Amino acid sequence: MRAVFIHDHNFVYDKDSNLYYDGSGGAFDENLWKRYLGLFDSLMVIGRKIDRLPNKMVVSSTDNVCFQLIQGAGGVRNIIKSKKRIKQELKNAIEAVDFAIIRLPSTLGRWAFDICVSLKKNYVLEIVGDPFEAYWYHGSWLGKFVAPIELLRLKRIVCRAQNVIYVTQDKLQRRYPCFGNTCAISNVRLEEVVAVENVEIFYRNEASIFKIGLIGSFHVKYKGHVEALKALKILKEKGYTSVKLHLVGTGDTDWVRELIKEYGLNDFVKIVGSVRAGKDGIFPFLDDMHLYVHPSKTEGLPRVILEAMSRGKVSLGSDVGGTSELLGAKYIHQPGDWQKLAKQIEEVILASQEQKISMALNNLKVAQGYVESILQQRRMEFIGKIIRDESN
């Protein structure tokens, strides 16, 4: 069977290597496609074509996967201008396959859903985020105007859909209910979790600097950088001088550097920049942190919090998306509440070694339920049943 994967993700084609690369973030690599190749013989990937190369390229090309990238699928003006052409390209692609995997929220995904319904093509929707939160906390008046529109758009699609996978256990389901077949499967990829003894050894070692990590793109201002810096400023003013915030992410860091200077935090913050996913970058980074914070204003199920938990790290997060499904109430603050975040960080700093170990091991236990082998089995069973029911 042939399948198509559709989402508003950026990809880059490099003619010198004849390979396609993930154009933003690095999560769309061969390991993502293997999820679906366990069910289908081949996969066509439809996304947005961009010409620039990312800071650190992550190869997306792999065997039995082809790419059909759409030009002009980014930006409101381009989308309006190219809408008819893009819809026809989507229709041609969907007609050529047996099954469609549509990741939402996305413009291409929204149009692809309507096409699948009109063609009576078998499909599954993957609901990976909340567009209302994303637009509401975008930081502009236009975002607040668009947010309720996007909420209604996704609600209308999901309530009509026959097959839906949510990345949360409950949060997205309540806001975007489906009356068809549903399943909760995170889109995080954890191949393994760290050993318990590693966690105990780490938190029993005395360290001169308490290291805090935050992972989030610098392209946008709703990933929690501002809140983390303001919380750090409070801690500095209270006399905590042996604390350092490490920031990982892609994009222009100038605006963050300006805030660091404004708050007098030059000695308290390190901008790491872009690092590779998994064992080649993110995991070694997290292994060196005492605390992971994620004060983002919008998420689906926050992958980076789960990654931190899988490395046995004490973690704090804002109450968006499915964060409350991962962390207990005492480790969560409301979006934008840097005062509460500062208090929570202080409590972790002052906690005993045994208390830190207990917090970290609780997180590790939760993360064990999100190991890829477990999620993949659930995914294959759910999509497999859709295929079988359609063929009967």
Image (tube, grey):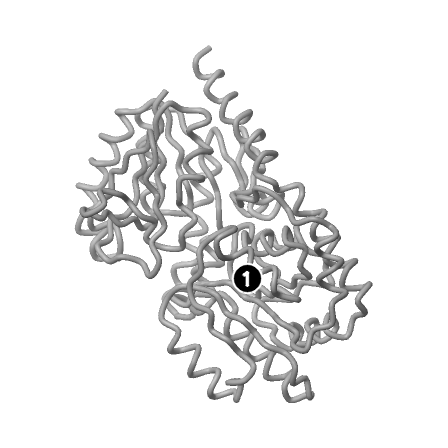
Q: Secondary structure at mark 1?
A: helix
Above or below: residue 128 compared with residue 241: above
Q: Position of residue 15 (x, y in %)?
A: 18, 46
Residue for point 24% across, 58% down: 52
Residue for point 49% across, 57% down: 281
- Which image quarter is the N terminus in? top left
Q: How many marks?
A: 1
> Is 54 left, or right, of 154 in this rendering?
left
Q: Nearer the viewer, residue 360 or 187?
A: 360
Examine the image and state in which quarter residue 33 appears.
top left
Give the residue type at disc 1: Phe
Residue indicated by mark 1: 285
Residue for point 70% across, 50% down: 364
Q: Position of residue 210 (x, y in %)?
A: 66, 74
Q: Position of residue 50 (x, y in %)?
A: 24, 53
Above or below: residue 168 compared with residue 250: above
Residue for point 67% across, 59% down: 313
Mark 1 packing: few (<14 Cα in 10 Å), some, or many (20+)? Answer: some
Examine the image and state in which quarter residue 343 appears.
bottom right
> Is 296 left, or right, of 64 in this rendering?
right
Above or below: residue 386 compared with residue 246: above
Examine the image and state in which quarter residue 238 appears.
bottom right
> Is 116 left, or right, of 388 in this rendering?
left
Q: Position of residue 155 (x, y in %)?
A: 47, 44
